[in-house]
Structures are given as structure tokens and as C-alpha cells.
Image (cartoon, coloured by chain):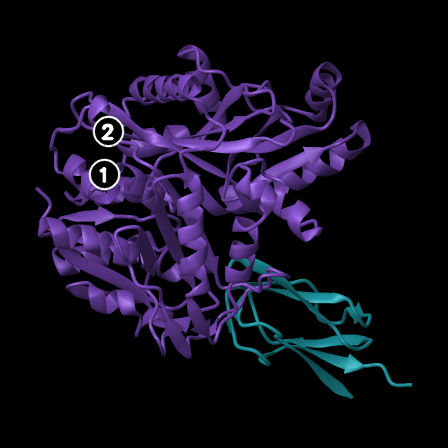
Chain colours: A purple, B cyan
Amino acid sequence: MIKKLLIANRGEVVSRIIRACNSLGIRTVAVYSEADRDALFTRQADESVHIGPANPMKSYLDVEAIIEAARHSGADSVHPGYGFLAENYAFAQAVISEGMTWVGPSPEVMKAVESKCYCRHIAEKVQVPVNPGTFDPIKDVEEVYRFAEKVGYPVFLKLDKGGGGKGIEMVNADAEVPAVFERISRIGLAAFDSSDCYLEKVVVNPRHLEVQFLGDHFGNYFCLGERECSIQRRHQKIIEESPSPVVMPADRKMIFDYTLRLAQAMKYQGAGTIEGLRSDAGDYYFMEINARLQVEHPVTEFLTGVDIVQTQLQIASGETLSLLQDDVKMDGHAIEARVYAEDPVTFQPSPGVIKMLHLPQETEDLRIDHALEEGGSVPPFYDPLLAKVIAWGKNRENATSRLIEALKDFQIEGVSTTIPLNISILEHPDFKSGNYHTGFIETLTGVSLR
Amino acid sequence: MDVSINAHMPGLVARVVVTEGEEVKKGQEVAVINCMKNEMTVLSHVDGVVKEILVKEWDEMQVDNPMVILEAKTG
């Protein structure tokens, strides 16, 4: 049983996890860097511990400093949120070695799914389709030439352990191969400690879809629906919705079945997400597994009424999932806009101090996940995500209107935000018709964001 | 004449791309600042030679923090 949880993160996700803990009667410990000394999330927790300077390498990414904070505060468990150490299996192992509970899948699963090639192998084993490509890291440029000859350019060169939008390079011709291969290997070594990369055929104008699932320690698994995440810039999501406007009921049944097969094959415990692509022709390809809570989880919570964070804590406490797949309601439509501290046209980051803040009123059909307050600082050292605004409606049109209305009522001064961009996406005819793909923002702004 | 190349964005120094004694042209990249996980390029606004490097990787930058001192070319 979890009694006192340390949250190894900062900002809105800390506020989100604290809310789940308050509902379950769990005490909370926040950690903070020098840059977040006065931040709202540190005051929302029951306790907070200073862990280091603004530099995340010496604070939010410092395993030893966070473990020490957990020991010092008497926490019996750790939730990593998303980003920072959330996918670091050595951190998960360190938490477990201290005799504490790790809120997430086992370090063994985390280590395994870090390799996209491993995921592709598992998928092949349980007959889940993957995008044509290699199943093992390539050894030299010759393999690229041979693969391109077979499937045709362009092809993707992807880092086996890449993530966060890094480590994906498109190659258009033989002549580009050596330079791209060299560059991606260098990025891989610098950012992910591994230069391994593999090949994939390019799916033209794909939809980015993912399926949320939960698994307990007793072999019970279920899916909480898909999320459509095709509206992205620089491989980072900006609008997410559920259900997807293009997934037909028979296909939904099929991708849920794929998800459950993959989760079971990995003996996955906790909350996870299967990410995949849907081609123009309606083919589905599995891509990877995100072994953590996801930023866009509120979309699914709004649609199903299931509190994913509370369920994570219950699973980690050793409880049995009381839901059955048939009990999961997918009612109406939910849609989320991520508000970033960025210039809406140039995407230049916009750190600063919040001089004025007016948030729309939260209601049964509107939720705002944030950790903002007037006078609060938006430091330049971390992710630009400021808030997520999530709306529910009985259909897609109603949910979108509700979200637009809320975004128009969201006022903030002191930092620039992507709100004008969020609104122009939601009001765009192609978005309204559901006819869009991962290149949508580039089409909208006419600027290449790569 | 010494000219200072300053940070135009707050953040953390990602890297300094010039070395002491190196000749630098106006408009050339001298350093990179990581601001909110975006890499922002710091350019020289003069021709010159790098006299002193004042920052290192992971240093915290505020706007207008001097990063590199150049001996500017005159005439």
C-alpha cells in the first residue's frame, strides 16, 4: 500500500499527480530545482525538497539527488511523471533497490522497450503488423542502399533508442546516405548513448494513432481507447483527440486486439501506450511502446471516466484491476490543446514571468491541467509546455467548439503562447472535416519546421 | 577593440563552437544556448579574433550575459 509518494518531476504533471494522491489519501513529496524554488507545484505538495541547481542534469535528471530526497522525506514510492527520468530504467531500479515502490512498468520492461528493434521483433512474434523495414540495427550504408532499392526512396533512418522527436532522419537519395548516417550516429551517441539505427519505409501523410492500455500484476489487461495525435510540429504533439475521426469500429476492435497481444507478450504492468501509424490506404502499423504516463492522458480520462493516474497508483500498490473491457465506456468526444510558451508563428521559446493570468472556468466538460499562477516564473531551462486545455462534447463538433471557446477565454501576459495557433488549427476546415495528417501544421503555416 | 558577444536568450549553454585565437566573421555561429529544449544559435555581430571564452557547457545564461570576447578587426 502506497502511503507517501515522491513525484520526480516539475510543473503541471506534479499538480496532476498530487490531485490523484489527494483523492486516494496518499501524502505527497515534491522535489524542486533552484529555478522552481517558489513554484506553485512545490506548495501544492504536502512536503517539498530542494534537489539542486536549475541545470536539470544536477536536479530533475540527477538520480542520486532524487533518491536522497526520497530517503530523507520517508517516501515509500516514486512516480516519475513524463519526461526527465520517466523512461530511465536505472532510476526505476534504484528506487526498487531502496525498498520503495516504482509507479510504472518493471525496469526490465522499460529497458527492453527502449529498443525499437526489440518492439518490432515482439510485434512480429505476436503477428502485429509493423512498417516494412529492418528488425535489427544496420551495420553499414550498404544496407540502406539495398533497402531503398527494394522499397524506393524516401526511407527513414531511425535511432533504435531515439525519442522525443530526436533521431528520425528522412533519406531521399543514395547520395545523401553517408552524411545522414554519420549525423544520426553522432546524435545517437550524444543524446542516447547508442548509435544503433534501423530502417523503415516512409508512410506518406500518415495519421499518428496510439492506444492507451492498463495491466495489473495478475494478468488483467484492458484498452481505454485510441488517441489521434497527428497534429504535431517537430514531431511534438499539439492537439490530441479521442476517438479518432478516421478509425472505424471494426478497425478499433483490431487495434485494441493488437494492443492487448503486445502488452501480454511483454507481461507489461501499469499504464502504457502503443504508438502506431495509419496510412492513407487504411493500413495500421505498430511503431513503439511508451512505458509511462503520457502528456495527453487527460483526453482518455475525459472520454472513459477512468482516472489513469489513480489506477497507476492502485496497480503499483498490488491491487487487481476491477474493470473489465466491456465496462469501459467511450462516451462522446474529448479533445486537448497543449499550450506552449512559444511564439505562435516562429515557435521561438518564450520564458518569462506571468504578469496576468485568467483561466477559463473548469466545468464538467472542461478541464485545465496546469501549474500556473500570477507572479509565477516560466523558467528557460525546461520544457515549454504551460498547460493543457481539455474539452468534452457529445460529438466531435461540440467538443471542438467548447475547446475553442475556452482557449479564447484563456488570457496570460508575460509570456507568448501558442493559443492563437491552437485556435487556428481547430477552426481550420481540414481539421473540422477530420481530413488531416502529421504534416498539417507545415501546410497551415507554409513553413518547414524541421 | 574588445567586443563582447552576449546571450540573446536565457537558458543553458549547450556548447561554445569557437576556440581562443580563432578568426570569426560577422554572422558566424559562436555558441548555442538551450532555451526550453530549443537550440538557439548565438551569432557574432563583428569580424574579429576570439580573445577569451567566458562560459562553458551547462552554465546558466540570462539575456545579455557576456559569452565570448572578441578582438574586433578595425577598418
Residue A149 shows which numbered tag? none
Residue A43 picture location, percent across and down: 22, 69
Q: Nearer the viewer, residue A391 or A253?
A: A391
Amino acid type indicated by mark 2: Val
Q: Residues within 10 Å of mark 1 (few under 14, many from 20)?
A: some
Q: Residues within 10 Å of mark 2 (few under 14, many from 20)?
A: some
Left or right of residue A178, residue A429 in this image: left
Secondary structure beneath label 1: loop
Residue A217 picture location, percent across and down: 17, 26
Residue A428 picture location, percent across and down: 58, 48
Residue A207 picture location, percent across and down: 54, 32
Q: Earlier in the sequence, mark 2 or mark 1?
A: 1
Kindly identify the residue that appears in the image at 49 percent across and 64 percent down.
A341
Left or right of residue A156, residue A388 in this image: left
**Res A318 → quadrant:** top left
Secondary structure beneath label 2: loop
In the displayed orientation, state which residue is furthest to the bottom: B1
Q: Nearer the viewer, residue A224 or A391?
A: A391
Instruction: Kindly identify which residue carries mark 1.
Output: A306
Instruction: Kindly identify which residue carries mark 2.
Output: A328
Chain letter for mark 1, please.
Answer: A
Q: Nearer the viewer, residue A248 or A18?
A: A248
Amino acid type indicated by mark 1: Val
